[in-house]
Amino acid sequence: WVIRSGREEAVQAVFFHYARSRARKEAEKLYRGFQGYLVTDAYTGYDSLDGICRALCWSHVRRYYIDSIPLDSRGKEISGSKGAEGREWCDRLFQIEKKLKAFPSEKRLQKRQELSRPVLEGFWAWVEETSAKYTANESLKTALTYTTNQRKYLETFLEDGRIPISNNDCETSIRPFATGRKAWLFADSPAGARASGIVYTLVETAKLNHLDVFGYLCYLLESLPDLDHRNHPELLEAYLPWSETLPESCRLREHRINKKCMF
């Protein structure tokens, strides 16, 4: 399981959690006490979690339509397919989001109502029409069914300008782990998997906070053994990746504070 904070949150963090299953009880454990929006895939384990309002990832929808595009003998897309049309509808939303990226959340929400909502209305009309006419292509049928079933969650991003329309940021954080997993294949034991999750949590969160990962890890390994954090866990606050009291040696050069220029 991987959780990443939204781009506009004060604390930027990624959390890797090992569990033996994808059971709903794991989701309940992870999100206990959290209230807010959660961008997810269509996994039903997130349904009915207390205090959570789900938003679905549009990148997942887009992939379904890409998978339904027929290919010729050379592996190239055959033009004019309904799958390509579905992808184009998704791309329109992403193009709007790209233009709104630098906007404050309130302004972004306003622009979504002006620009994205009409696109969505056109998309749903297209989905309904296409679902009624094209049923032979099983991949397209799967894409249309997925889209229709998840409509409620696909529209959640219209409620708050802070909600991204995809969880691509989270998948970016997962990629180094996924790449590494192909090399080492297995964690060997649950304890090893948990240890791996802790290390990746530190490393990926350090990246989000513009830290020099090697410098930060060295600082932790040098400092924490002498820290009485078991009796005083609050002492760890100063060592977290977003702490403003971290030494400059932990930060990437371009993000170090030039104290001579401070007033």
Image (cartoon, grey):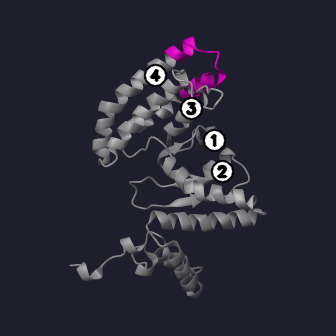
Q: Nearer the viewer, mark 2 or mark 4?
A: 4
Label placed on residue 124: 4
The quadrant of the rendering that contains the C terminus is bottom left
Q: Amino acid at mark 1?
A: Gly
Res. 225 visible in picture: yes
Residue stretch rendered in magenta on the structure: 129-148
Q: Which residue is mark 3?
A: 66
Confirm or deny contact between disc 2 and disc 3 (CB under 8 A).
no
Element class at badge 2: helix
Q: Looking at this view, is 113 or 252 the one in front?
A: 252
Residue 238 as seen in the image, left or right of residue 181: left
For label 4, the SS is helix
Which comes before the other along the chain, label 1 or label 3?
A: 1
Up the image or down, 192 lies above or below 172; here it is below
- Of labels 4 and 3, earlier in sequence is 3
Q: Position of residue 131 (x, y in %)?
A: 56, 16
Which residue lies under the disc numbered 2? Answer: 26
Q: Marks 2 and 1: in contact by CB < 8 Å? A: yes
